[in-house]
Amino acid sequence: MKRSLKELIGYSIKAKNGEKGKVNDFLFDEKSWIMRYLDADLGSFFNQERVLIPHNFLGEPEQEEKNFNINLSVDNIKRSPNLNFDMPVSRVYEKKLADYYGIQNPYWLVDSAAFAGNEMVFYPGVAFRAPRKVIKEEDIDTSLRSFNEIKGYGINARDDSFGHISDFIIDDTDWQILYFVVDTNNLFPWSKKVILPIEMIDKISFTDREAHVDMTKEAIKESPEYNPDDAVNAELEEVLYDYEGKKK
């Protein structure tokens, strides 16, 4: 099923034996556009407690109850390696997390093998261009990016800058990010939300806080409209790819 990441922010974490915490953010891999972790806050208003839950243990969200099912017990989640809110996610931390949960083939090893073997995997390309500050060689940052960080970035089209990224649409069978939603809020009176395939993002600049999209302003403006109350289904996807194919 196709789901909005924006909608899932704030859902209650529903473990196997009870509820604990809220969905705070999602971390995705910039190399593959796959959502790797759910970032959960298990603490209180006065004492935040941040943990990452690998996507291997994510169940199906319950839209009406606004619960996110997690295939772990509350104790499993609480005892996982803690990550402070002001810390970046390092590969060192990810290895600790993989060891704790007994993940035999972490994604960075699987991805390396896939690239080396030229397997047919959906990798729309690395759009991110930003140097990373490395404190220690063994703590070299991963390729993880935050949904909350990217949400709100401006749109830089071929011929103009306008609007911003307001949402990502993922497939919850493999947590692949397939689409991004553009809010054209400063194109009055044409202001609306439109949906585009993620591969249309050519580059993301963290310095300028903007996404470069390989389309003209007019083409983006005329893209299929996105209504968060309607499901992203096969009919919409057919219209979307038919439109984008004509604009390439």
Image: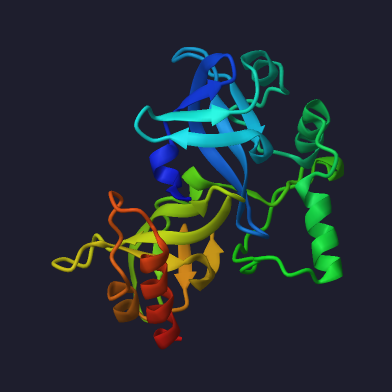
Residue 45: give x, y in percent of width and height.
44, 15
Visible in this render: residue 99?
Answer: yes
The residue at the point 51 percent across, 24 percent down is 13
Residue 153: give x, y in percent of width and height.
42, 56
* Left or right of 138 on screen, residue 41: left
Q: Quadrant of residue 194?
A: bottom left
* Left or right of 173 on screen, residue 193: left
99 w.r.t. 152: above or below: above
The residue at the point 58 percent across, 49 percent down is 173
Question: Looking at this view, is 9 or 119 the one in front?
Answer: 119
The residue at the point 64 percent across, 32 percent down is 53
Question: Looking at this view, is 186 or 233 the one in front?
Answer: 233
Visible in this render: residue 158?
Answer: no
7 w.r.t. 160: above or below: above
Q: Quadrant of residue 216?
A: bottom left
17 w.r.t. 246: above or below: above
The residue at the point 86 percent across, 67 percent down is 116
Residue 99: give x, y in percent of width and height.
83, 30
Question: Looking at this view, is 66 or 145 the one in front?
Answer: 66
Q: Residue furthest front?
A: 234
* Left or right of 166 on screen, residue 214: right
* Left or right of 230 on screen, residue 11: right
Question: Looking at this view, is 139 or 224 the one in front?
Answer: 224
Colouring rule applied to residues = rainbow
Residue 141: give x, y in percent of width and height.
73, 46
Total marks placed: 0
